[in-house]
Image (cartoon, rainbow, N blue to C red):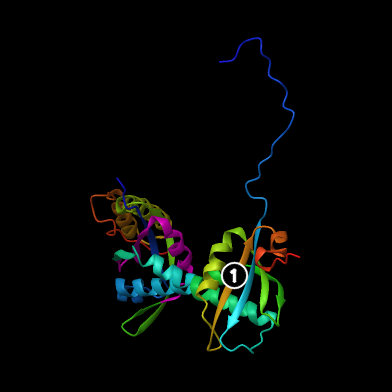
Amino acid sequence: MVRLKSRYLLCEVCVSDRRNLSLLDDRAIYTATKAAVARAHGDYGAALSSLGFSVKYLNAHTGIVFLRCRKSHYRLLWSALPFITSLENRGQRVPCFLNCLHVGGTIRTCQKFLVRYNTQQLHRMLPLCQSEAERSEIRKSVLSCTLKKEADDEEEEDE
Amino acid sequence: MRRADIQDEPATYERLVYKNTSVYHYMRISLVLENESTRLSAAQLKQLIVSGLRDLYGEVGGAFPFDLLTFDESTLTGVLRVYNSGLVKLWSALTLLGFYQNELCFFRVTQVSPFLLTLSGNSRELELD
């Protein structure tokens, strides 16, 4: 039985100003990525990548994005990600860059990676904390990291 | 089944098979323009091919290295050299190239070969005395 395989690129949107992060929406990322692939790989790349491409998940609080594409040409998309310099949303241009953290075959594996990554980020944040209240807050979030809960509930800071 | 008293004879010859001897592919092309009297220099031809590659394959494709080995300005024929991995891209870009400075044109590919020696003659231009 022929199975249509896909690759999920787990990317993090890094902006200089955190307030702009909440303005993100998936249409902006979709158009920006398509334009970047068209610029980097031409008509061939634009046509090939538009076949199975979609933005599956976007978290405006942490800036995590799941991009879904076909397995045969996920590298085209991956190599065009560094060429994205800004996201356009309702007339406002937000300069940013997309950092690819993980490539997975299913959404579930990407979520598992995300939980591990978030715990690592929290561990890194622990020594930087100023007050005891923040520290206990972080310890509580680390202990409660599971796949059952929403993976984006934890506080995460961009390093 | 082999009989026990038959010994293997030592091999008297050795046969070597190369899968890919040549790293490059060579193409003899000729440019046909709508206006017969337009002349191009070698640099302009290379610029045209690079622009065709860039339209079809983007910045990454347009940066693929290829060389114009010879170019005859009067007949607008030349020989291109490209790495094996880029042959399909170059050939498809040449096929889809249609315009040179708002003038209709097309590329005709007469010969393609991994060896340059093959391009020295072809049966179309063979003269039998």
Q: Quadrant of residue A157?
A: bottom left
Asked if A120 appears above or below B105 in the picture, the reply is above
Which portion, as a residue range, is magenta? A59-86
Q: Where is residue A116? Give x, y as percent.
A: 36, 50
Q: Where is residue A89? Give x, y as percent.
A: 33, 80
Quickly name the residue at label 1: B109
| Position of residue B3 in the picture relative to residue A29 (left or right) | right
Pointer 1: residues within 10 angstroms few (<14), some, or many (20+)?
Answer: some
Q: Is residue A60 magenta?
A: yes
Identify the residue at horizontal 35%, vertical 76% (top origin). A20
Q: Residue furthest top?
A: B5
| Position of residue A126 in the picture relative to residue B23 (left or right) | left
Looking at the picture, tell me which residue is in the foreground, B36 or A79. Answer: B36
Asked if A70 appears above or below A20 in the picture, the reply is above
Residue A159 visible in rendering: no
Looking at the picture, tell me which residue is in the foreground, B27 or A75. Answer: B27
Q: Is residue B38 magenta?
A: no
Looking at the picture, tell me which residue is in the foreground, A111 or B49. Answer: B49
Identify the residue at horizontal 30%, vertical 65% (top origin). A59
Q: Residue furthest right?
A: B129
